[in-house]
Image (cartoon, rainbow, N blue to C red):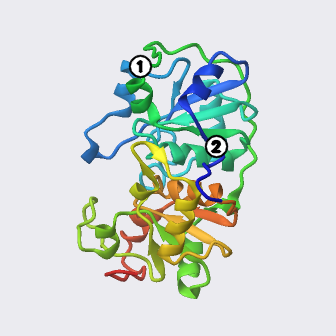
Amino acid sequence: MGTGKSRFIVTPQWVEERIASPGFSIIDASWYLPAHGRDGAAEYAAAHVPSAVFFDHDRVADQSTGLPHSLPSPEQFAAEMERLGVSNRDLIVVYDGPGFFSAPRLWWMLRIMGADAVFLMDGGFDGWKAASRPVETKTREARHVRFKTDFRSERVTSLAEMRQLVASGATQIADARGAGRFEASEPEPRPGMRGGHMPGARNLPATGFSEGGHFRDLGTLASMFEEAGIDLSKPVVTSCGSGVTAAIITLALESLGHDDNSLYDGSWSEWGSLADTPIVTGKA
């Protein structure tokens, strides 16, 4: 395994060489927390990778749950991809500003919805601009395409399933929130939400999986799971604050060949807001 890189990560040069290729789609999936002081849509409008389209995590979501950016239905997702001119048969590259924050969420969504060839651009758009690569401000007219879904429901964990998993202790839970929130030594950013973590969960902060916009090598990823007490020969459910950065752990798992995993879409925004869900504080 050594210092090899994830098979899902492509270089900016690789992307630049394929921008004009038929059947190639590139998507800006930048989304930020208020603390970041950044606006993904505004930054896309100001400049983006040539031919890139913009995916809005807040708008393309199941708005009926009362939770932030819940997974949309396959029908809603397909309609949005077709509006953007992205086919499930395309070679698709997703990026965000810093490299690995919100882009893995769309990478995960595309894959569970039926797209097979989905990759992430190393370094993000911040790295693209720093290297003085070409940018554009216009939005190109979308191609007329079809996005045929093949929804992999087993890759999404519901609240009811999460309750059973926690009660049984049979499945490993990897939580991508920072240590302070995981241990409840720092307050949750959403009002009225309890702090702490699910019984049995292990803490793997999402920020640790990349450095300077570059995803960690496979050897480092494997060590991170080992140090956190996650056995890669067994199933894993990923979780975070609202279902976005959990996909970073999913990306790491898949990069290591672990495919017996699912993502708890409601994550802590759901679990921590309920009065009857078991919670523990302190270190795992």
**Whole-percent x and y of residue 40?**
38, 33
User: From the viewer's perspective, is residue 61 above or below residue 256?
Assistant: above
Q: Quadrant of the C terminus?
A: bottom left
User: From the viewer's perspective, is residue 43 above or below residue 70?
Assistant: above
Earlier residue among tags 1 and 2: 2
Please name the residue shown 76% across and 47% down the image.
150
Residue 92 in which image quadrant: top right
Q: Answer few, some or many: residues within 10 Å of disc 1's Cα (few below 14, many 20 plus, some between 14 and 19).
A: few
Give the residue type that dot 2 points to.
Leu
Q: Is residue 30 left or right of residue 8?
A: left
Give the residue type that dot 1 points to.
Ser
Task: Say whether marks 1 and 2 touch (CB < 8 Å).
Answer: no
Compare residues 52 and 195 and report the one nearer the observer: 52
User: What element does badge 2 sit on?
Assistant: helix
Q: Answer few, some or many: residues within 10 Å of disc 2's Cα (few below 14, many 20 plus, some between 14 and 19).
A: many
Can residue 264 be seen from the camera position used here? no
**Whole-percent x and y of residue 102?**
46, 45
Q: Is residue 38 left or right of residue 109?
A: left
Read off the residue under disc 2: 110
Compare residues 18 and 87 and report the one nearer the observer: 18
Read off the residue under disc 1: 132
Please name the residue shown 43% across and 14% down the image.
137
User: What element does badge 1 sit on?
Assistant: loop
Compare residues 237 and 73 and report the one nearer the observer: 237
User: From the viewer's perspective, is residue 27 above or below residue 245?
Assistant: above
**Whole-percent x and y of residue 36?**
28, 43
Q: Quadrant of the N terminus?
A: bottom right
